[in-house]
Amino acid sequence: MTAKPPPTAYAWDARADVLRAGWLRKEGATKMSARFPSRRYCVLAPAMLEYYEEVQVPHRPGAAPGTLLVNEWNLVLHTTNHASELAVGDVIVAVDQASTQGKQAQAVLEEVAAPCSLTVLRPKGLIPLRGAAVQRLGKRHGGVAFRIDHSGGDSVPGAGASDGRRPFVLVAPDDDEAAAWLEAVRSETADSGRSPSGGGSLQLQTSTSTVCSSTTQASTE
């Protein structure tokens, strides 16, 4: 079992299935996005690697009626609240730059009277890991890159077809981070008999249709 990393500003302590989490850069499928990889917050869960982009969402209390439902780790499960541009699947990590770690974002927002900015992690895609090949590529983009080739591995609902897809290339900031990620990811490539959606994952906690649409459309970004 991969050890859980020390808490960070975005560590989801309430989410039991998180094995490792942190910022990496990810090459995209186009020449431009491969040359200039995007910053992504990556979350390693059993047999899958989820990745998110950080976005700022305006919140205007009282602008319109509606409802907002988040879970214990501030994942948006349901929203009809037109006061903000939150979407199902977003994870609220800060309100006006103040971290929501250890707090219920829903309760925090109920106390907010003035317009503010929400920092959210928005799902971009997920990478199935069972049966995948993981390889260190060396120095790249000012960091240390590694590749996940899951062309022969299992698929995960919502990830789209893997056959013929180019490998995923991720870039850690330094050798130590790369080594830690490689060890953690490789430990999840073996067929351990565990479900890829290990109890607390985004796959189980949100609307399947919404997550499938999001990850299928953006899985190469």
Image (cartoon, helix red, strand yellow):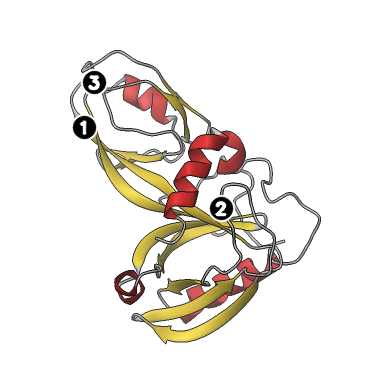
Apparent side of residue 119 relative to residue 71 in the rendered image (left or right): left
Q: CA distance from mark 3 to mark 1?
A: 8 Å
Mark 1 residue element: strand
Residue wearing tag 2: 159
The answer to whether the residue labelled 1 contacts the one labelled 2, judged by CB atoms less than 8 Å apart, is: no
Residue type of the residue flagged with mark 1: Cys
- What amino acid is found at the position of numbered circle 2 in the picture? Ala
Give the residue type at disc 3: Pro
| Rendered view: 93 above or below 61 | below
Q: Residue at x 29, y 13 (%)?
A: 65
User: Residues under labels 1 and 2: Cα distance?
Assistant: 33 Å
Which residue is located at x 60 percent, y 43 percent? 201
What is the number of callouts on the image? 3
Q: Position of residue 204 (x, y in %)?
A: 62, 38
Q: Nearer the viewer, mark 1 or mark 2?
A: 2
How far from the left and from the top, in percent, is residue 155? 65, 56
Q: Earlier in the sequence, mark 3 or mark 1?
A: 3
List the residue tagged with mark 3: 61
Q: Earlier in the sequence, mark 1 or mark 2?
A: 1
Nearer to us in this view, 88 or 142: 88
Callouts 3 and 1 close, C-beta under 8 Å: yes
173 shown above or below 196: below
Q: Dot 2: within a 10 Å radius of its alpha carbon, few (fewer than 14), some, or many (20 or more) residues? A: many
Q: Is residue 20 above or below residue 147?
A: above
Q: Position of residue 105 (x, y in %)?
A: 40, 30
* Residue drawn at x 39%, y 67% as measured from the top left: 28
Image quarter (top left, top right, bottom left or bottom right) of the C terminus: bottom left
Q: Quadrant of residue 220?
A: bottom left
**Mark 2 to mark 3: distance in Å?**
35 Å
- For disc 1, the marked residue is 116
For label 3, count other residues whose C-alpha is less than 10 Å away and answer few (under 14), some (14-19) or many (20+).
some
Farthest front residue in view: 164
